Image (cartoon, rainbow, N blue to C red):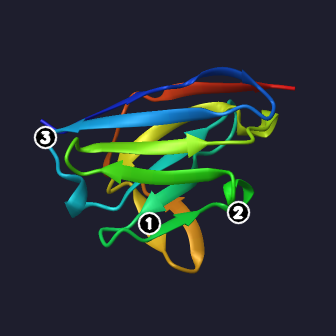
Amino acid sequence: QEQLAESGGGSVQSGGSLRLSCAASGLYYSRYVMGWFRQAPGKEPEGVAAMDTDGSTNYVDSVKGRFTISQDNAKNTLYLQMNSLKPEDTAMYYCAAGALDYNEYEPPTCRPFGYWGQGTQVTVSS
């Protein structure tokens, strides 16, 4: 059974950093576009970062230069390093496999199918 489990969320002040982790079981990262999306209360899900099967990455404009997506294939774990956090980054963050579209020229967008975890809350205070 495919499962994704996020961890690493928390509460930080503006300008702080967090690293999210996503452990996968029952699926192999190399077969999917992997990534992260977030959802704030009352808003639609937003693709944040995606990694194609060849390792190419893309980000939504609002996090470029601040967030970095990476993965450890040996551990089947995906990461999202978030630096210089802002209050507008506050949301529930979800790890996704096959649930984001990857486009070299456009920010990642969410698909209504694929796999995602339960989410981890990130709260940034000003």
> Which residue does the numbered mark 1 point to in the structure image?
101
Residue in the image at 53% along x and 66% along y = 58
Mark 3 or 1: the one toward you: 3
Could you tell me residue 3's position as x and y percent? 23, 34
User: What's the distance in space between the residues labelled 3 and 1, CA to CA?
Assistant: 21 Å
**Comes first in the chain, label 3 or label 1:** 3
User: What's the distance in space between the residues labelled 1 and 2, CA to CA?
Assistant: 15 Å
> Which residue does the numbered mark 2 point to in the structure image?
61
Q: Nearer the viewer, residue 114 or 61?
A: 61
Q: Nearer the viewer, residue 110 or 23?
A: 23
Could you tell me residue 100's position as x and y percent? 43, 59
Residue type at the position of mark 2: Asp
Residue in the image at 53% along x and 35% along y = 19
Pointer 3: residues within 10 angstroms few (<14), some, or many (20+)? Answer: few
The quadrant in which the C terminus is found is: top right
> Which residue does the numbered mark 3 point to in the structure image?
26
Are the residues flagged by discs 3 and 1 in contact, CB closer than 8 Å? no
Could you tell me residue 93's position as x and y percent? 53, 36
